[in-house]
Amino acid sequence: MKNVVVVGSTNVDKVLNVEKYALPGETLAINSYQQSHGGGKGANQAIAAARSGAQTTFITKLGNDEDGKQMLTGFQNDHINIDHLVTTDQAQTGKAYITVDKSGQNSIYVYGGANMELTASDVEAHQEVIAQADRVIAQLEIPLEAIIAAFKIAKAHGVQTILNPAPAKELPEELLRLTDVITPNETEAQTLTGIEVADEVSMLDNAMVFFSKGISMVIITVGSKGAFYATPQAHGFIPAFKVKAVDTTAAGDTFIGALASQLEMDNSNIEDAMLYANRASSLTVQVAGAQNSIPTRKQVEAANQKTDHTHEQIEREKEQAAQYVAARIPNHIVLGLGSGTTAAYFVKAIHDRIEKEHLDIECVATSVGTQQLAEKLGMRMLDVNTIDAVELTVDGADIVDDHLDGIKGGGAALLFEKLVANMSKRNVWIVDPRKPRHTLEGQMLPVEVVPFGGMGVFRYLRDHGYQPAFRFQENGDILATDSGNYLIDITIPKDADLQALSENLKKQTGVVEHGLFLNICDEMVVGGDQVKVVKREDLKQD
Ligand SMILES: Nc1ncnc2c1ncn2[C@@H]1O[C@H](COP(=O)(O)OP(=O)(O)OP(=O)(O)O)[C@@H](O)[C@H]1O
Ligand SMILES: [K+]
């Protein structure tokens, strides 16, 4: 268990939920007013660390008032060591006035109060507890002199120092020199380095600036995208969990406290610790408020388990769809084998049947991956160039709409899949229940482009509002398809005419193919304990 000392602010949050933000001079009615909640970056981070199991001490200054008493009780309930907490008659406990809009975005005004009275000598009076810690964390809602005093004590005793440079402001070199780990969000990073955080390359550029100031680890959180880490030896990006955010207040604080509770002192488990922190803060954003939304270790673990469970269930549903279709394949045909994880279940299922029933079925693969799998199983494979037609092709799909039109290519095999689909007399798609949607609008659509001249297509797509992005591999290299082309992912606009979009994309020089499969799927089979079948001929009758 990590021993963490947090030196920082305590605020009482007064939260307003608003439809939209009032402009200067404008008055807007609101329909809900939340009562006071505990908040303040220091308090939030201490609570996040404590709830995740760290032995946590909080050095903060409170006013001698009701808000202060309420906060103190809260800290005790979270088993935070408050022996080193300081009170003052000179100012009130800090307060934050927070507005949260419908999208979960927040805007905050802070009255520092007692927080701004925390002095270097207050901190020095408690140096023993800092000296005994594994790490000390500070943020910028207290005077810099108090942070510097804490970090000096830490450095003198080999204690790791973590600076969360929030709210954003420029910092003295002295403080940066005393900092081991810095944890800005994207705007805070830019304030300190002058380099905009746009992608992983620019995050690394940001990290380089911090390294040059003597900081040995940089963690940049980028909201719903996730978080980046870099040391001079290694770096990586850990994507956030996809959740419905209702209020991001305390997301960053949860991340930092959770990370501080998990991260080994030699950083050996950095990716696991960041994954844990991402999970913890993904829970925080799903609940309104600050401290009440910070999860415990148990809740984080339960959420992880639930995901594992969901993952298992999706795999089961894919397999159910695959087995349903495999059981109904006629004998003596040429069969197209799709690509991707769902299609792989089908390949295995039909292989089993061919073996058991000695079926006379020859197959055509739609990707190098499927070809390899089928060959490994010893199936009879044909070269697509030696045949005129395929009787039936069974493939997966990324998304399918109400008209059985769909998107494929998430797994980067769209060109061969479309070639074989077009040769097939009948196409059956097997999917799990998350794939069918009413519409393809707003969905990601892959466009396969030749590497030479791909930038020209990219510019065209960007200038026409398709929000293009090249597809990269996890190691940061650009992804090449089976035919050595690149993929550009675009977003299908609202109210798009899919047929026109399809034709228009094909017309662009440099575009090889795209992932819109219109009028191709004859039958969709959705896995589940009750398999559901949707046929194109039935749609036409409606
Ligand atoms: N919408 C979201 N969905 C899922 N995870 C999120 C979302 N927003 C934030 N997170 C998680 O919280 C972490 C921190 O978020 P963010 O980068 O917004 O911090 P911050 O700007 O300091 O937040 P705040 O000031 O609101 O506390 C992210 O790295 C991510 O793991
Ligand atoms: K929240």
Image: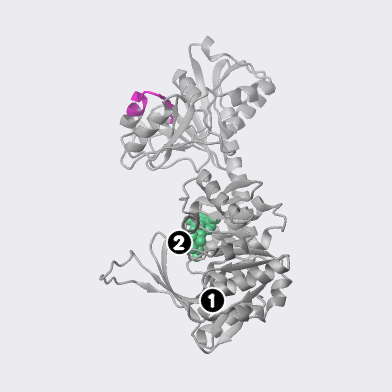
What scheme was used to colour the molecule? one colour
Could you tell me if residue 127 is visible in this image?
Answer: yes
The CB of the residue at mark 1 lies under 8 Å from ligand 1? no
Query: Where is residue 32 shown, x and y percent of the image?
Result: 38, 72
> Is there a contact, CB below 8 Å, between mark 1 and mark 2?
no
Within the magenta stretch, is there residue 507? yes
Residue for point 60% across, 51% down: 229
Viewer-side residue, 501 vs 349: 501
User: Residue under circle 1?
Assistant: 10
Which image quadrant: the N terminus? bottom right
Numbered badge on residue 246:
2
Q: Could you say whether the residue bearing mark 1 is in a helix, strand or loop?
A: loop
In the displayed structure, 84 sits above or below 52; it is below
Query: Where is residue 441 shown, x and y percent of the image?
Result: 37, 41
Q: Which residues are magenta?
A: 503-515
Which image quadrant: the C terminus? top left
Residue for point 62% across, 59% down: 181
Question: Residue type at mark 2?
Answer: Val
Is the residue marked by circle 1 packed among few (<14), some (14-19), or many (20+) residues within 10 Å? many
The CB of the residue at mark 2 lies under 8 Å from ligand 2? yes
Viewer-side residue, 359 vs 287: 287
